[in-house]
Image (spheres, rainbow, N blue to C red):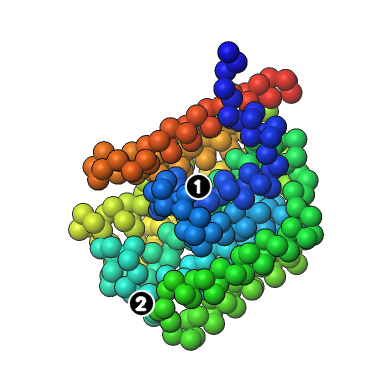
Amino acid sequence: MAKFNMVRLIENKIAPAVFLLFFAPFIGELLSAHQTPLGFLNPLSFIAMALPYGFGALIVRELLIRWGGGMFKFFLLALAFGLYEEGIVVRSFFNPNWSELGALQGHDFAFGVSWTFAFILLHFHLVFSMWVSISLAEMLYAKRRNVSWLSNKMLGLCILGLALWLPAGWLMTTYMPPIFNYLGVIVIFIALIFTAYILPPKPRAKIVSKAKLHSIWFFVVGVINVITTYFMVFIGPEMGILAPLPMAMGILFSISFATFGFVAYGTGLFTRWSDQNRLSLAMGVLSIFFFISVTKDLDEGFVGGSLVVLVTFIFLFQLYQQIKIRSINED
């Protein structure tokens, strides 16, 4: 009996755009433990809360291909997606009573914005919703990583699907922030996309078989980034450790800049990646969700999160094996 290979099955049977359409929601909603497997598989819940992640990832990737974008353009477009969801659609940045604030409620709220909470939401969408999902999809479909995955018609449908999230968000959340704040987010959202569009085209990073630094360091840096960030925003406050807002924001930005600097150094300013490095960084940042999903099943009753982690581990391990074979063949 042939050994089951999830990665090869997906690569051979599923179009890359279809895979990313569902894989981004898998990362953003299911693996992150925002939804249980049963909730995620509920058609209404999936369409209203999860599917737009897939539209966003497809749009960001397609615009990078068409506009000739490097990592900086990716940051701009990924941040635009985060601002759209959290600032424009559900307006969680501004709602002082947002359910996920937890112990932060009232602590980091200033000038109509929950600042550290807004930071981690943008961090989440940039790192997980966009970078992890797009990077893993491109590693899987390595032969098609530098070509378009969408026709003009399909791109238009993705944009329409993402736009329809706005009225859905207004139906789900009724809080209305101060008009100046809301218009400000819209202006920044438009400015990010326009800036990404007008920046000169830049070749995407060259994928190399051997990179400057060993992959283990990318994994370690990813783990440090997410653990420190989540401690500052969620874990610490629940333990009664609440840093003053300026200090908290300073630490959060320092962590992000240090991570950015390390990865930039290790990849020659984002010009030469190895798939081993990208996979290790992705596994490092995903480690926080592996831990959360398993501990939730152990502490709060089994809801299936540990099974999601198991499936993810199998996928990542088989993807690693495929990348290793590809690297040997290239050498």
Determine the image quadrant of residue 141. top right
Indicate whether 245 appears above or below 152: below
Q: Nearer the viewer, residue 132 or 28?
A: 28
Q: In x, y percent, where is residue 276?
A: 59, 31
> Element under label 2?
strand
Looking at the figure, which quarter contains the C terminus? top right
Determine the image quadrant of residue 8. top right
Q: In x, y percent, where is residue 133?
A: 57, 46
Which residue in the rendered view is the most extreme toward the front? 43
For label 1, the residue is: 27
Asked if the residue at tag 1 contacts the one at tag 2, i.e. Cβ–Cβ closer than 8 Å, the answer is no
Looking at the figure, which quarter contains the N terminus? top right
Q: Is residue 110 visible?
A: yes
Q: Give the residue drawn at x 50%, y 55%.
A: 43
Q: Give the residue drawn at x 43%, y 38%.
A: 308
**Would residue 230 be found to the left or right of residue 324 on screen?**
left
Q: Amino acid at mark 1?
A: Ile
Q: Which mark is residue 110?
A: 2
> Element under label 1?
helix
Q: Nearer the viewer, residue 73 or 39?
A: 39
Q: Give the residue drawn at x 72%, y 54%.
A: 62
Q: In x, y percent, where is residue 30?
A: 45, 48
Q: Give the residue drawn at x 73%, y 59%.
A: 155
Q: Which mark is residue 16?
A: none
Q: Amino acid at mark 2?
A: Ala
